[in-house]
Image (cartoon, helix red, strand yellow):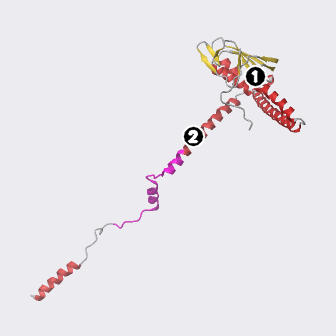
Amino acid sequence: MSDEHNHDAEDAHGEAATPAEPATAGKPDARPPSGRQRLVAGLWPPRASRAQLTVAVLLFVLGLGLAIQVNTTSDNGGTLRGARQEDLVRILTEVDNRTQRLEDEKRGLETQRSELQSSSDQAAEALKQTRQKEQQLGILAGTVAAEGPGITLTITDPHGGVAADSLLDTLQELRAAGAEAIQINDVRVVADTYFTDGTNGVLIDGRQVSQPYVFKVIGNPQDLEPALNIPGGVVQTLEKEQATADVVRSQKIVVDALRPLKQPDYARSSNR
């Protein structure tokens, strides 16, 4: 009995001592992920930081701006490519004339400086230049009458298609061509001149201006007239509005419409 009991105990002990099989028995061994799987797991779903998103937005905006600039340049280039040879020559001449005017102005200022530095009586020379500058500023401010070579531009608008912006474009083109003094009908044009559309036509500086619109312009006629006749310029634009623009050159244009002299409310001269 004792031996049988011991034997049974040993069997029970032996069965208890046998380790249990793992739960994964009978299943294939787990393999590490391949390189492609690790790459896909790293890229998807995408994880972007705030800095990366900011850089992406800036690159998008930069690319959009470059695309718009290229498109605009292409459009302008298309206009020139469609122009005739004589029109291209005229545009090139206009650019050369503007460059020449800037060079002449530069040389004039350098000459004034040299005269002021080399004059034995610098006080008298300074007074002379000051009076000349006063006359020039008076012409620009419209407080002094002026005369000289230039053109007369007459715009006739029988259908009323010429609006304030068309006259403003004409004025800007004349200024770019070197106009020094301008009068439209009986209104002197100055730096702060403005155009508005009224119920009965165009107003200049708040004053009603009737047709025809007559521009008296002092400047180099050889620069002013071609500037108005360039392709897509003032004359062609007015013709699209069924208006006519007549340009007459003259060696004596009188601009005598005057502006009242205004004293500034706050600005004072400074000796510094």
Type of amino acid at the residue the image marks with label 1 = Ala
Is residue 233 something one can see in this rendering?
Answer: no
Is residue 176 something one can see in this rendering?
Answer: yes
Q: Is residue 59 magenta?
A: no
Residue 72: x percent and y percent?
63, 34
Return the residue at label 2: 64
Quarter-of-image position of residue 249: top right
Instruction: Give above or below for 104 relative to 242.
Output: below
Judged left or right of residue 202, residue 97 is right
Q: CA distance from mark 2 to mark 1?
A: 43 Å
Mark 2: few, some, or many residues within 10 Å (few <14, many ≥20)?
few
- Between residue 30 and residue 75, name the one nearer to us: 75
Return the residue at label 1: 181
Judged left or right of residue 27, residue 80 is right
Report the residue at 59% width, 39% height from top: 65
Residue 125: x percent and y percent?
86, 32
Q: Is residue 42 magenta?
A: yes
Bounds of the magenta segment = 28-57
Residue 117: x percent and y percent?
86, 38
From the image, state whether disc 2 or disc 1 is nearer to you: 1
Quarter-of-image position of residue 137: top right
Q: Secondary structure at mark 2?
A: helix
Mark 1: few, some, or many residues within 10 Å (few <14, many ≥20)?
many
Report the residue at 74% width, 25% height from top: 140
- Between residue 1 and residue 160, name the one nearer to us: 160
Quarter-of-image position of residue 58: top right
Type of amino acid at the residue the image marks with label 2 = Leu
Report the residue at 70% width, 30% height from top: 80
Q: Earlier in the sequence, mark 2 or mark 1?
A: 2
